[in-house]
Image: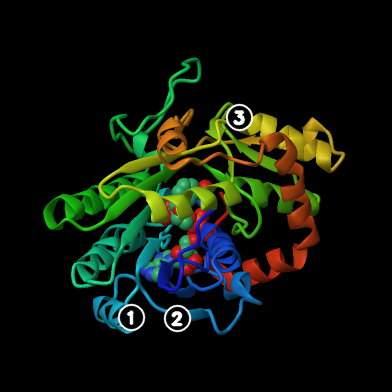
Amino acid sequence: MKSFGDVTILIFGGAGFIGSNFIRKVIFLSPNTKVVCVDVLTYAGNKENLEGLPKERFIFVKGDIADRAHMQKLFKKYSPAYVINFAAESHVDRSIHGGVEAFIRTNVLGVTVLLEVLRHTPSIKKFVQVSTDEVYGSLHLASKKKFTEQSPLAPNSPYAASKTSSDLIARAYHMTYGLPIVITRCSNNYGPYQYPEKLIPYSIIRLMEGKPIAIYGDGRYVRDWIHVEDHCTALILALLRGVPGEIYNIGAGEEVDNLTLAERMLRFFKKSKSEIVFVKDRPGHDRRYAIDSSKIQKELGWRPKHTFHSSFEPTIAWYVQNAAWVRRSLARAGTANIHI
Ligand SMILES: NC(=O)c1ccc[n+]([C@@H]2O[C@H](COP(=O)([O-])OP(=O)(O)OC[C@H]3O[C@@H](n4cnc5c(N)ncnc54)[C@H](O)[C@@H]3O)[C@@H](O)[C@H]2O)c1
């Protein structure tokens, strides 16, 4: 894969799950590139995820993407060639039960602030807005359909609605001001450094603590799982080769339902199915996501390297081996933790 060369990449939300995996990959693949990570460090952001990176090529700045004056200063100071935005409130359950304002503030207002500042950044070659398949809503369990880039936008949760809004604003900034903006929409990620409130790490932690796995409804909720490293490779290609104004779906085509996932975790821990408890369903719960990623495969030459079959158990093992990281992440977030 081509490297970025002797330029600066500004990365927003890089202390979270996907952002921190992305930064490590860029630092490794692109030896002449300077990486500036800007993150406000919410409960989900963790500087520890970025430890050990070379000081001469990696800078961390604490900052809020909704703070326009600060963002203006940073864009001016670093004159980035590439910008990628991971910063978001990202947990669907929080958007339902924990108040939607933070989602609107970061996912809608914050993205708008970045786009406004981008208008006055002549050094910019590409801006990637990292989005989600949840903007397309839900597919029927029995159907064989997949989301394409032309699928109608039909978000069902407040989180998905906030991400859809930023996609539309980003598109409008491309159409109106000609900014070199690319939008990517990825399916559910798994891998190391995910804050332990999301299904996979949360369930692993519960099993490690001798508690049962909590599964929503009947558990027949299908997600199209992708390893975070494959997502990051696709994002690098979107930055380097993505065509401004285009949307690229990213998914590995690995549909697995929550019950099957839970049973695999139980097998790893040598526990029985009686360790699953079914809890009251999430309101508006999307039944199935499935991504058609043929466009990014054909046009940008991306291919996923991981299979769920070979990479799921190593992911479980990572959380077991990094139990101290999990404990520290939860302790740092303190009362912000929400487990439903
Ligand atoms: N996790 C997935 O499966 C998945 C799938 C598709 C798309 N996405 C998208 O990818 C992006 C990253 O997801 P993630 O799972 O790494 O999320 P995450 O919650 O782990 O990380 C989000 C990061 O953004 C930071 N942040 C939040 N508000 C901010 C603000 N106002 N200013 C600066 N930083 C702020 C947080 O501190 C955190 O470090 C999100 O935009 C999400 O919508 C995630």
- Which residue position holds label 1? 74
Residue under pointer 2: 61
User: What residue is rendered at 62% in x and 33% in y?
Assistant: 258
Q: What element carries label 1?
A: helix
* Mark closer to the observer (3, 1): 1
Q: Considering only order in the chain, which callout, 3 or 2, is on the residue closer to the N terminus? A: 2
- In the displayed structure, 140 sits above or below 85; it is above
Badge 2: residue crowd in 10 Å (few <14, some 14–19, many ≥20): few
Q: How crowded is mark 1: few (under 14 residues within 10 Å), some or many (20 or more)?
A: some
The residue at which mark 3 appears reads as 257
Corner quadrant of residue 286: top left
- Which callout, 2 or 3, points to the residue nearer the camera? 2
Q: What whole-number distance in Å separates the C-alpha atoms at marks 1 and 2?
A: 9 Å
Horizontal and vertical percent for residue 245?
25, 47
Task: Locate residue 155: give its quadrant.
Answer: top left
Question: Mark 3 or mark 1, which has the lower sequence index?
Answer: 1
Give the camera-side residue of 51 and 264.
51
The percent position of residue 338, horizontal first and vertical second, equals 54, 57
User: Mark 3, residues whose alpha carbon is within 10 Å: few (<14), some, or many (≥20)?
Assistant: some
Q: Which of 235 and 117 is in front in this view?
A: 235
Question: Disc 2 residue type?
Answer: Val
Helix, strand or loop under label 3: strand
Instruction: Let me know if residue 93 appears in the view.
Output: no
